[in-house]
Image: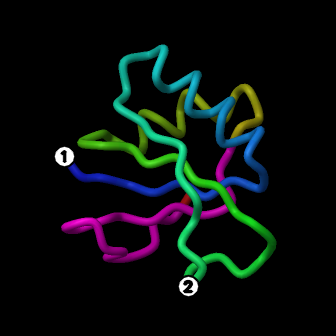
Amino acid sequence: MNDYLMVFRSLTYAQRAGSLLSGRGFRVAVVRTPADIWKEGCGWSVRLRGADIKAAIELLRPVNLMPKRAFRLENGEIAGEVAL
């Protein structure tokens, strides 16, 4: 399993997504998006720890909580962008 960072358009969307995923057993944290990957406003993200991003996206899509972008993390650093 990997860690992922899903970038949302606002704090509200990140909180809603985090709450939904947490309620389904995902280990999540709502965090500020690193400035080097998101230059469009303040940026908030949900960090998935040791999770399957495809399963998370399957839960978020039907309720219109899709992230703007997603990244795979290795040792806490951005390792690459994930296609949504």
Q: Which residues are magenta?
A: 66-83
Crowding near the residue tagged with mark 2, few <14, some 14–19, many ≥20 C-alpha atoms within 10 Å: few
Crowd band around label 1 with a 10 angstrom C-alpha radius: few (<14), some (14–19), many (20+): few
- 75 lies left or right of 84: left
Q: Report which quarter residue 63 is drawn in.
A: top right
Overall secondary structure of the magenta stretch? strand
Residue 45 percent across, percent down from the top left: 58, 53
Q: Secondary structure at mark 1?
A: loop
Q: Quadrant of residue 18?
A: top right
User: For residue 70: magenta?
Assistant: yes
Task: Judge whether residue 36 is colored magenta.
Answer: no
Indicate the position of residue 17 as horizontal and vertical percent values.
62, 33
* Amino acid found under the numbered disc labelled 2: Asp
Q: Residue 1: give its label.
A: 1
Which residue is disc 2 drawn over?
36
Pinpoint residue 33: horizontal percent, then vertical percent.
Answer: 58, 65
Alpha carbon separation for disc pair 2 and 1: 25 Å
